[in-house]
Amino acid sequence: MDISWIKFVLVSLAIFRITRLIVFDQITAFIRAPFLMEYEQTNLLGEKESYLVPRESGLRGWIGKLISCYWCTGVWTAAAVVFFQWKFPVIVDPIILVFGLAGMAAIIETIVQNLISD
């Protein structure tokens, strides 16, 4: 498989952004909800903290473990992106472009926020 460096970077950024969307973003919380349980705990300062924990068993538990692990979800996201890019490039190319640019924007925003807060 021959891939240009710009395509490699763009696909990498898209995989980064899609993975974060699945694992962390609030907009996809409804997707994670059937597979994760929320626990609240009071810390030593008396503040309530919420934790998402995978369900304990069965298919929902397995999927919960998968989507609560950034590294695991990243591998499966990468596999899916490569597969769909290979099979349906005309459809997937614009999606990769959008998510790749969004991934770069997220990285730039993180850098800017860290510079402002320092």
Image (tube, rainbow, N blue to C red):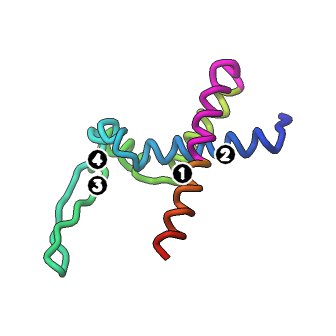
What is the number of the mark on residue 106?
Answer: 1
What residue is disc 4 on?
Answer: 36
Asked whether 53 falls inside the magenta stretch, the response is no
What residue is disc 2 on?
Answer: 12
Quarter of the rendering occupied by the N terminus: top right
86 sits to left or right of 23: right
Query: How would you rate the neighbour count of disc 4 (Cα within 10 Å): few for under 14, some for 14-19, many for 20 or more?
Result: many
85 sits to left or right of 28: right
65 sits to left or right of 92: left
The kind of residue tagged 4 is Leu
Determine whether 94 is above or below 78 in the image: above
Q: Nearer the viewer, residue 115 or 10?
A: 115
Q: What main secondary structure does the magenta stretch of the protein show?
A: helix
Q: Which residues are magenta?
A: 86-103
Could you tell me which secondary element the residue under label 2 belongs to? helix
Q: How many marks?
A: 4
What residue is disc 3 on?
Answer: 52
N-term mark: 3 or 2: 2
Q: Nearer the viewer, mark 1 or mark 3?
A: 1
Q: Nearer the viewer, mark 2 or mark 1?
A: 1
User: x and y percent of residue 85 in the render?
Assistant: 68, 27
Q: Nearer the viewer, mark 3 or mark 2?
A: 2
Determine whether 79 is above or below 41 in the image: above
Could you tell me which secondary element the residue under label 1 belongs to? helix
The kind of residue tagged 1 is Ala
Q: CA distance from mark 3 to mark 2?
A: 27 Å
Could you tell me which secondary element the residue under label 3 belongs to? strand
Query: How would you rate the neighbour count of disc 1 (Cα within 10 Å): few for under 14, some for 14-19, many for 20 or more?
Result: some
N-term mark: 4 or 3: 4
Residue at 84 percent across and 39 percent down: it is 4
